[in-house]
Amino acid sequence: MDLNKAIEFAQLVNAAYAIPPDNLANSAGKALIAGHTAYTVVTTIYANDLATDMNPGRGNHEVSIGFVCQADGTGDVVIAIRGTEGIQEWINDAHFLLVTCPFLAGAGHTEDGFTAMYNSLRTGDAAGSPTVVNALATLPFPQPVSSVTICGHSLGGALVTLLALDLAANTNFKNPTVYSYGSPRTGDPLFVSTYNQVVKNSFRIANRLDLVPKLPLPPVYEHVLEHYELNPIQLIPLPSKILVKLTFSCEHSLDSYLYLLSVVSGGPLLPLDPTCKP
C-alpha cells in the first residue's frame, strides 16, 4: 500500500466531512488540494442518512455525503464518501440484519442499514436522480477517465466497499482502487469472497483500538481484504507511548487515522485534534 496515497485520499474524505450534511448545494467546480494534487469537484453525492432504532426518522433525511472529483490535468477520478454521526447509534442498536446483495446475484448478503443507504446514493438532491453507479459514465469530466479510486471513512468505508463491487461487476470501470478507513464489516463470507475475487486493488485501513471495524461480529460478517493495521500505542522505542487518547471518538476519528498514517509514513506529521492528545 502506498502510504502517501492513503493520506491523500483520506484528506479528500476529510474534505467531504468539511461540507455540512444539510448543505445540499452541489459543490461542482469547487477546488480541492490533497497531498500535492489539485482536484476539482464534478458533483456532490447525496443519500438518505443511516436509520437507527434510536432515530428511525434519520433514514428519511437527505444529506450530502461526499463527492466525485477529478485531478486537474489528468484522468484520475476519486469518489470520496464520509461517515455519519449516526454510527454510534448504529453500534448501540446492535441489530445487524443481513439482506441479499442488491446488485449482484449470488454475491451473498450485506448489512441492511448500509445496503439501504447505498441504494439511496445519487448524484442529484431529488428522488429519482441517477445513482452514482449509473451516473459515473455520463458525468462532465474535464478529462477522459483513466482511473477510479473510491475512498471512505466509517460508514463511508462500508458504502465504498459496496460501490467498488457494483462498479467492478456492473460497469466498464472494472478496476477501481479502494481505500477505506475505520470501516465496519459490510457483508457475510460469500459477499467477502466475491468482493475479494472481483475487486483486486483494495486497502482496508483499521486502527487496532477502533471499535467500529470490529463490528458486526464474525462469523456471520467478515472483512474484505487487504488489511493494513494502525497501532495507536508506540511500542518501540521503550518505554511505550500512547499516541491517541483512548476514547471511542478519538480512536475512530479520521483526523486520528491521518495522524497515525503520517507517523508510519515518515513524512511530515499531520495535526492531531487537541482533544485527542493523550
Image (cartoon, grey):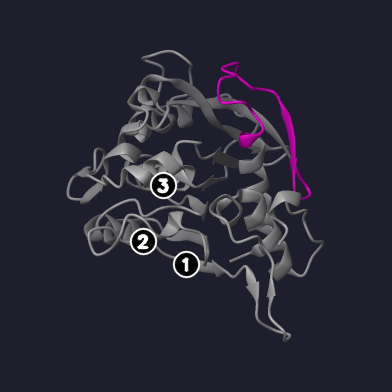
The percent coordinates of residue 72 (x first, y second) are: 73, 37
* Viewer-nearest residue: 110 or 57: 57
Q: Residues within 10 Å of mark 1 (few under 14, many from 20)?
A: some
Sooner in the amino-acid sequence: mark 3 or mark 1 = 3
Q: From the image, tell me which residue sits under label 2.
A: 223
- Residue type at numbered disc 3: Ala
Q: Which residues are magenta?
A: 16-37
Specify the label residue 227 is tagged with.
1
Query: Label 1's element?
Result: strand
Above or below for 58 versus 52: above
Specify the label residue 48 is tagged with.
none
Q: From the image, tell me which residue sits under label 3.
A: 158
Above or below for 177 versus 85: below
Q: CA distance from mark 2 to mark 1?
A: 9 Å
The percent coordinates of residue 211 (x first, y second) are: 46, 58
* Viewer-nearest residue: 181 or 179: 181
Q: CA distance from mark 3 to mark 1?
A: 14 Å
Q: Residues within 10 Å of mark 3 (few under 14, many from 20)?
A: many
Tag 2 near tag 1, CB within 8 Å: yes
Residue 112: image quadrant is: top left
